[in-house]
Image (spheres, grey):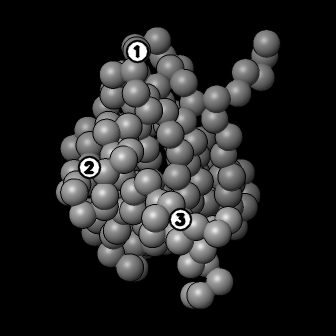
Amino acid sequence: ITEWTTFLGTDIADAAVRSFYGNPADYLGFNAGAADFDGDGASDLAIGAVGDTAGGTDWGGGLYVISDTAGFIGQKASDVIIDYQAHIWGEDDTGYLGWSVAGTGDLDGDGYEELVVSAPNGGSSDVGEVWVLSGELLTGDSRVDDVALLRFLGSDNDNQFGTGVLGHADFDG
């Protein structure tokens, strides 16, 4: 796509801090969010992959958490091999976990920031789901319900609750 090869006069390959690659059908990078999920004081990156089929689901979706993103700055893409901190996958066929992703801050006071992630076609009859995931549990490979603090469901069939989520907001002052 030639129109995306430059950004403000800079070649995209020169401007990129880091590129991440996944299986084409996973749609890695559909959405992303950042927060300090591992409690080390540096922001980590959560990258949605709505087409992920891990855990035996068909388009159940998923996400990857990449820690120590600050260590990538200034390095060429060929200098670093990325290992993920966590790979979380959805539980429902065509749930599309990872559709929307946002860091929320430390909701439970354990020193780890939490992650809000949606699966707008999750739940029975595509009511949609929004999950609050424990930052402390975001390690290794897990199904979403194994690392969740909370799960919210939409109320109507084909509602697609969770198409968008918002993090780091103080609604009650």
Using the rendered image of the protein, determine whether residue 167 is visible from the camera's viewpoint: yes
The answer for how far apart the CA atoms under marks 2 and 1 are is 21 Å
| Placement of 45 over or under 135, stated as above or below | below
Front position in the image: 106 or 129:
106
Give the residue pinned by disc 2: 84
Instruction: Name the element at disc 3.
Output: strand
Q: Which mark is residue 88?
A: none
N-term mark: 3 or 1: 3
Residue at the (53%, 20%) spot, across then down: 107
Give the amino acid at mark 2: Tyr
Other residues around mark 1 within 10 Å, as few (<14) / some (14–19) / many (≥20): some
Q: Position of residue 88 (x, y in %)?
A: 34, 51
Point 26% across, 43% down: residue:
85
Outermost residue, front direction?
Answer: 9
| Residue at 32% over, 75% down | 23
State left or right for residue 3 relative to residue 138.
right
* Residue 10 in the image, given as x and y percentages of width and height: 58, 67
For marks 2 and 3, the one nearer the N-term is: 3
Q: Tag on residue 111? A: 1
Which residue is at a point 24% across and 63% down the rendered structure image?
A: 78
- According to the picture, the residue beneath numbered tag 3 turns out to be 30
Q: Amino acid at mark 3?
A: Phe
Instruction: Note whether 35 is above or below 110 in the view shown.
Output: below
Say if 40 sits above or below 65 in the image. above
Query: Residues under labels 2 and 3: Cα distance?
Result: 17 Å
Q: Secondary structure at mark 2?
A: loop
- Hey, what amino acid is under mark 1? Gly
Asked if disc 3 and disc 1 are in contact, CB closer than 8 Å, the reply is: no
